[in-house]
Amino acid sequence: MTENRPRRLALSVLVSLNGVIGEPMTWAGPYFGEGSAAHSLAVLERSDAFLMGRHTYELFARQWPTATGPYADRLNRMPKYVFSSTLTEAEWTNTTIVGGDVVAGVRELKEAGGNDLMVYGHGRFGQTLVDAGLVDELTVTVVPVFVPGGTPLFRDGGQGHHWELVHAGEGHDPGLATLTYRPATAAKA
């Protein structure tokens, strides 16, 4: 009999050298090659579901349903949950809209047990998950570019948290650096 352990929530974010996370599809593309694609697919394959806020849903729902290839096939097949108080229907296959309390909804998905839950980006949805202490692994991939403007990774108003470095090294393609953290234990914080 297998143990029904809570799922881990893994949050992954791309950030420019000057700390911008907004609209990475406009500046990260030249650095995202075969190595990053293979790694992203491996992460999705060990995940049970993909979680997102409304903004990420709107971006992804325009791009991925018609895309082909192993990554697109996995993303389109897997269960997806969009947390939104304004969306009323989701056209992207296997997508469920979760209204109401984001923290309670994500906590319920984690407690259901199974493999990882995956989140991309660190917008309002990601920041809410970090502030609530629901993120078990935070991966920051630094892209070697300065972006003239956009949403910063570091914003005022977030809760204070301590993290411990699990891995630091070159990213999966030339020029990238990857930092992976997990919440620090109370004794270390």
Image: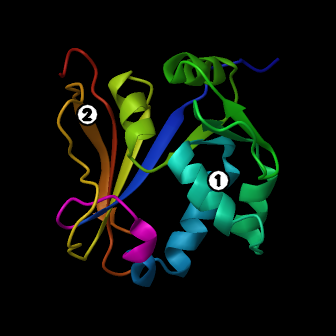
Q: Residue tagged by mark 1?
A: 44
Give the quarter of the figure containing the N terminus: top right
Q: Is residue 64 above or below residue 90?
A: below
Towards the viewer: 101 or 14: 101
As drawn, is 124 to the left or to the right of 50?
Answer: left
Give yes or no for residue 20 being in the magenta stretch. Answer: yes
Towards the viewer: 96 or 38: 96
Q: How is the image coloured?
A: rainbow
Give yes or no for residue 100 being in the magenta stretch. Answer: no
Towards the viewer: 97 or 164: 97
Towards the viewer: 55 or 104: 55
Is residue 172 something that shows in the picture?
Answer: no
Label count reads 2
Label 1 crowd (10 A; few <14 / some 14-19 / many >=20): some
As drawn, is 42 to the left or to the right of 134?
Answer: right
Give the quarter of the figure containing the C terminus: top left
Q: Is residue 131 above or below residue 69?
A: above
The quadrant in which residue 21 appears is: bottom left
Segment tinted magenta in the rendering: 17-27
Q: Residue tagged by mark 2?
A: 163
Residue type, numbered disc 2: Trp
Residue drawn 78% across and 64% down? 73
